Amino acid sequence: MPDFSLERELLDDLGNHHGGRLATGPEEAGRGPWAGPVVAAPAWLDAAALDPALAEGLDDSKKLSARRRSELFEILSDPACACVRVAVGEASVEEIDSLNILQASLLAMQRAAEALSAALDSAPGAALVDGKKLPQLGCEARAVVKGDSRSLSIAAASVVAKVTRDRAMAALARDYPGYGWERNQGYGTAEHRAGIARLGVTPLHRRSFRPIRDALASKSLT
């Protein structure tokens, strides 16, 4: 289960040179889908004041049920909860197609970190980032493979990012019915593939992704 070990280790390694004892955990959601933006969220948790029940309930968002993610999201995003601060940022479909999905994900993380700095009234002194690549965060950062299963900050961020994106895709499904985005969140499921075959490609599909390129090429040949 995730804990604060990595946060404490990072702050200890930086000593008194990190500009404040704040460690955050940026995480992204939506790298693999064929449609929609990529969303990122950082989270700062006050280890000394955090409710133990909340800490015990946090984990990699993919391991949690949709209901449990929603419950945790409401707690984490409640401005009345002084021991938690979260923010979100995103990169659009146009940016994904222009930059590539990796660079767009890093851009979304950078925007989310800037939003969190504004919420905290100061830039975090250090950050743990899930994965192998580091965005430009304006602070000391350390990449952590499978960080959402190891760090409470990253686990909290993963919940916020996923729930935010899932709800956004459900809203977009009302504008573009027939693709099942409210259920598949834009991933390449059989339902989504059938929707593309029947209805075509929307402005929210990622044209840099091969299945969408193939669908567009197939249409141009008919």
Image (spheres, rainbow, N blue to C red):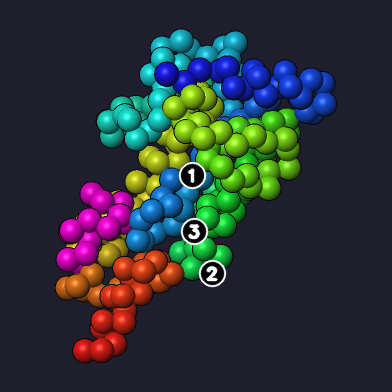
Task: Name the residue: 40% across, 25% down.
Answer: 59
Q: Which residue is mark 1?
A: 28
- Front-most of 75 and 20? 20
Q: Which residues are magenta?
A: 182-195
Task: Name the residue: 26% across, 81% down.
Answer: 218
Residue 141 figure quarter: top right
Dot 3, how many residues are within 10 Å of its Cα: few (below 14), some (14-19), or many (20+)? many
Circle 3 — which element?
Answer: helix
> Residue 101's mark?
3
Measure the alpha-carbon separation of dots 2 and 3.
Answer: 9 Å
Q: Is residue 138 above or below residue 20?
A: below
Dot 2, how many residues are within 10 Å of its Cα: few (below 14), some (14-19), or many (20+)? few
Measure the alpha-carbon separation of dots 1 and 3.
Answer: 11 Å
Measure the alpha-carbon separation of dots 1 and 2.
Answer: 18 Å
Residue 63 lies left or right of residue 23; in this view the side is: left
Q: Position of residue 140 (x, y in %)?
A: 72, 35
Q: Position of residue 211 (x, y in %)?
A: 31, 68
Mark sitting earlier along the chain (1/3): 1
Eye-nearest disc, 1 or 3: 3
Disc 2, disc 3: CB below 8 Å? no
Q: Which residue is mark 2?
A: 98
Residue 67 lies left or right of residue 207; in this view the side is: left
Circle 2 — which element?
Answer: helix
Q: Quadrant of the N terminus?
A: top left
